[in-house]
Amino acid sequence: MRYSGLRVIKEALTGHKGWKPAWRDPEPKPSYDYVIIGGGGHGLATAYYLAKQFGKTRIAVIEKGWIGGGNVGRNTTIIRSNYLLDGNEPFYEFSLKLWEGLEQELNYNAMVSQRGILNLIHSDPQRDAFVRRGNAMILNGADAALLSADQVRAEYPFLNFNDARFPIKGGLAQRRGGTVRHDAVAWGYARGADSHGVDIIQNCEVTGFRIENGVCKGVETSRGFIGATKVAACVAGSSGRLMAKAEMRLPIESHVLQAFVSEGLKPVIPGVITYGAGHFYCSQSDKGGLVFGGDLDGYNSYAQRGNLPVVEDVVESGMSMIPALGRARLLRMWGGIMDMSMDGSPIIDRTHIDGLYFNGGWCYGGFKATPASGFAYAHLLATDTPHDTATAYRFDRFRRGYMIDEKGMGAQPNLH
Amino acid sequence: MIINHPLLGPRDSQEFTYLGDAALIDRPDWQAEDAVDQFHDYLYLRDNPAGIHRELWFHETGDRSWLVVTRDTTTHEITSVELARDVARARGRSK
Ligand SMILES: Cc1cc2nc3c(=O)[nH]c(=O)nc-3n(C[C@H](O)[C@H](O)[C@H](O)COP(=O)(O)OP(=O)(O)OC[C@H]3O[C@@H](n4cnc5c(N)ncnc54)[C@H](O)[C@@H]3O)c2cc1C
């Protein structure tokens, strides 16, 4: 069924009796050509592009809970392509271009809103670093603009411009960045994949791999064995836990990241702003809530909740960037489990086990990557070669010394 | 989280910084035949368990000692705290 304005009017006149479920609820088949583990944004996008772009059939997405219940439904929805390094920037720019056409592609309203992202500058060296980054973005076909303090003030008059320690000296803007309705991304890709024949199997946990003579033959699940020619792991924060079942140790630690939303307010923050003197970022949802977050809690965690010290830290950073934030009341806060990699960049690669593929290490930036991650993973699964924009996302980059370390932090996952 | 420091008693986890898996105590032998492989695994690969995890915390704003904290990564419950020095010595390090 195609969604359209006309359809809404027709349904309104006929008592909304014509709407159908957006995807089926099939029983698992004994075997598939492709089994994708994890019904988050990345797994569903992978299934969609595998079917639509690469013409593959006999595909299943296996999700232990319900689709969209993981990080894709817990993140702060920011999309952008403002990376510095060659291994990353073409990939994220490809992703941003896919976001720009996503709703037409999927015939689904994902509320892609290019309201712009602004990184604040507080010192001369920081301006130098941002100029360099802006130039790298432009060289890779993305957009970037350097703003003076006055230009920032015109857009965001309420920021703490004259702070004694961290005065605002300007900003780096990417106008094409913005936010997307996160749940709708999962649902839109699920509906698209389903309409191309993909089986989306929920409430089905992968409990093990069947590996014979170094070849992966399928997965053991809570609903029985499912055979597969190619098995594609795509479980974000659960990567370590899942791949341990194939006796793999990963260059990944799982950490908890918290996010916050205030009560609904009148429109006050038009775009996304990030603080340059502490770790804090903020946008305003279409419902009016201020959506914000900051640092990881900093220790290994699989609990989808954090602790109070980081709450205090995030709110302090927020207050020092937007003093008026102190008058807003916090409505909700929650946590999600991040697959923090050793250099802060992801992996989309084959494993040493034939027929077993891996996608993970997205840290807290994987939402913006959803379309490109799905596309590149589908490319790898369909052709056994990496997509042009994802050639650097290999397992062996650590051994070979080709880390993609945007922050220059080294192998310390909680600092990326 | 409260970390029960073996020398100082219960301290707020905010006083500490976190390094990671306590296996980092077992630095490989740089003269071993396969030192390159061993250092790759040591530096970059992690068990990353969901459940009991032994990990290194540094009492940065306190007595600056390193601790080995045993903690459940699914509940954040801490079940034991030792001085990293004692753990390392028990494994034959820094005799
Ligand atoms: C608080 C927070 C804020 C964030 N903010 C941003 C942001 O502003 N911008 C941005 O780009 N990124 C952000 N991120 C990161 C982003 O959300 C993730 O990197 C991305 O969603 C991960 O990919 P995914 O959607 O496929 O993961 P998920 O939605 O987590 O999907 C993985 C799925 O695998 C399933 N699964 C796990 N184990 C098994 C198993 N054994 N068998 C079957 N299924 C299994 C899980 O149930 C889950 O549904 C944020 C994350 C958090 C937590």
Image (cartoon, rainbow, N blue to C red):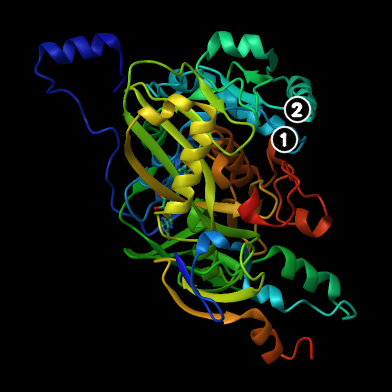
Left or right of residue B88: residue B53 = left
Give the residue type that dot 2 points to. Answer: Arg
Quadrant in the rendering for residue A268: top left
In this orientation, which residue lies closer to the viewer: A409 or A70?
A409
Mark drawn on residue A388? 1
Q: Are marks 2 and 1 in contact (CB under 8 Å)?
A: no
* Residue A88 or residue B5, whichever sits in front: B5
Task: Give the chain letter at badge 2.
Answer: A
Which element type, helix, strand or loop, lies under badge 2? helix
Q: Quadrant of residue A168?
A: top right
Q: Is residue A49 visible?
A: no
User: Which quadrant, please, contains the N terminus of chain A?
Assistant: top left
Point 34% across, 58% down: residue: A204
Assess disc 1: are there few (<14), some (14-19) or many (≥20) residues with their C-alpha within 10 Å of its C-alpha: few
Task: Please identify the residue farthest to the left as the structure is shown.
Answer: A15
Question: Which numbered disc, 2 or 1, marks the residue that appears first in the sequence?
Answer: 2
Image coordinates of residue A396 in percent, x first then y, are 75, 57
In the depicted structure, whether residue A148 falls above or below residue B6: above
Residue holding disc 2: A133
Q: Position of residue A403 (x, y in %)?
A: 77, 49
- A334 or B41, nearer to the observer: A334
Instruction: Determine the chain carrying the residue at label 1.
Output: A
- Few, some or many C-alpha atoms within 10 Å of disc 2 (few <14, some 14-19, many ≥20)? some
Above or below: residue A92 compared with residue A350: above
Vertical arrangement, residue A1 with respect to residue A249, above or below: above
Numbered tag placed on residue A375 in the rendering = none
The amino acid at mark 1 is Asp
Which residue is depicted at the point 72% across and 35% down? A388
Q: Would residue A6 appear left or right of A334 to someone viewing this image?
A: left
Q: Residue at x 67, y 65 (%)?
A: B45
In percent of width and height, residue A321 lies at 54, 28
Q: Does the image show residue A177? A: yes
